Image: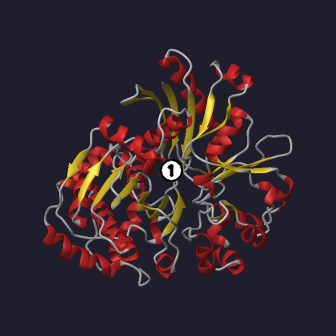
Amino acid sequence: MKQIAFDLGASSGKVMLGEFDGTYLTTEVIHRFPNRQICVSNHLYWNFLGIHQNLTEGIRKGCAAAGGTPVSIGIDAYCNDFGLIGRNGDLITQVRCYRDLRMARNEAGIYRIMSRRELHFQNGNQNALFNTLIQLAAMRLEGDGFLLEQCETLLHIPDLLTYFLTGQRHSEYTLASVSQMFQWETSNWDPEILSRFEIPAKLLAPIIMPGTVAGVMTKETADEIGVPRMKVTAVGEHDTASAVAALPTNEPHAAYISSGTWSLMGVEIPEPVIDERTYRYNIAIEGGVGGRYRMLKNVMGLWLIQECRLEYRKMGTTYEFAELVELAGREKSFVSLIDPDDEAFYMPGDMLRKIRDYCIRTGQPVPDTPGRFIRVIEESLALKYRWVMETLEKILGYRIESIHILGGGGKDTLLNQLTANACGRTVYVGPQEAALTGNFLMQLQAAGAIGNLEQGREIIARSTQIAIYEPQEQKAWDEAYEYFLTLLPLSE
């Protein structure tokens, strides 16, 4: 049984061909492409047409490599960003990037409509300026609310891509659950939030669950691409949901870090937990696959290194990611630390200067070489993971026994070891293409090849090579953590 999976990240996209023989899942990446936000007149956009073109190219390559018609295709991507479909069925708006400044410009006005506290207790989502709800509120406050009245449907990026393949309009559950417009009690859109923010209910498509068929590629689209028609499956379309689906374990007290541009660290829980502690620490409750819920915290992640690489490239030196990690590994430990989630690091550009300014502001030595900058970032990320782990343990009342690093960030062997050291837990790394692997699992479930998520995770465990990192240098890391805590905001 062969299938195609498409995964879009904030820095790159991939298309993979998977084959399941009843025992093992084998995979092959058949198409890769870069992805980055584009700044035009001080606004940030995604090149959606380019993304769509790469999807169709990946489908074409996938069918050629499969030697026939794959059973289905599944699409996952980052959450919250969307396009609006007009009355004639076409895309009316450019797809804005979640880092666009219009939300920050209107922050005060947005939270006068509904406070951060009220919003969190309504649905358990993290309070973040990139949430779909906040983007829509900013549109209204900047005078673009008429678009919401005149357009027919809002579709998040994976659902938008599915729509252009099949003509079907759906909102996949894991994407809907993080939009800040979802209601757990009904598993549907929240009428109170829609009313308070003046969002037309007609704009939001019916919600469908992962592991179900979203539609079949139209004949016109299949002919245009030059492939046979195939099913499009609703997977865990939020890429983190797909990555967590690919955990190679069914242990109940394991934590995960979905590591990429963002690091999303959390645990699976059987029921949503929303209380004063989740509000205080801005812990998110999100929908997962297989009837699970994801309790997690966003950490800025490898975005910091990606931005440093881009800046060095502009200065005339191109470093491969692995080269920077190697340079960092030669540097002295704990010279300077940063809070990776400081608001200064959120927007693109000038990352080296921002890190220098942070170190000056906090009275620490200023890094002055590529290796020292990356060492600061990696040690700080590892220590922030420890803070998230301990916060989750306090809320849940049990000890997290192990940490699984999922996704492309697992290629960073230095950060893997630093994470084990900082957290004092065994770290398991893999699969590195976790979102794509979890994407395949939901396609297999929709096709009836597996019965449930537990069975799928057993398949991943025997199909994937897992690297293991044991904690080292505990005393030095405990001392560094005590200092790191002094850098965090009082609310943390």
382, 41: nearer the viewer:
382
Instruction: Please tell me which residue is depicted at 76% across the width and 43% down the height of the picture.
Output: 91
The furthest residue to the top: 67
Specify whether 154 is left or right of 300: right
In-front residue for pair 353/143: 143
Could you tell me residue 229's position as x and y percent? 66, 23
Q: Position of residue 284 (x, y in %)?
A: 51, 67
Please tell me how crowded label 1 is: few (under 14), some (14-19), or many (20+) other residues with Cα within 10 Å. some
Q: How many marks on residues? A: 1
Give the SS element for disc 1: loop
Quadrant (top left/top right/bottom left/bottom right) for the C terminus: bottom left
- What x and y, as percent, mark residue 421? 20, 63
Query: Residue under circle 1?
Result: 290
Q: Is residue 131 above or below residue 3?
A: below
Q: Name the side, left or right, on which 282 lies relative to 384.
A: right
Compared with 320, 154 (above or below) is below
Q: Residue at x 53, y 74 (%)?
A: 274
Is 38 left or right of 381, judged from the image as shown? right
The relative height of residue 227 versus residue 175 in the rendered view (above or below) is above
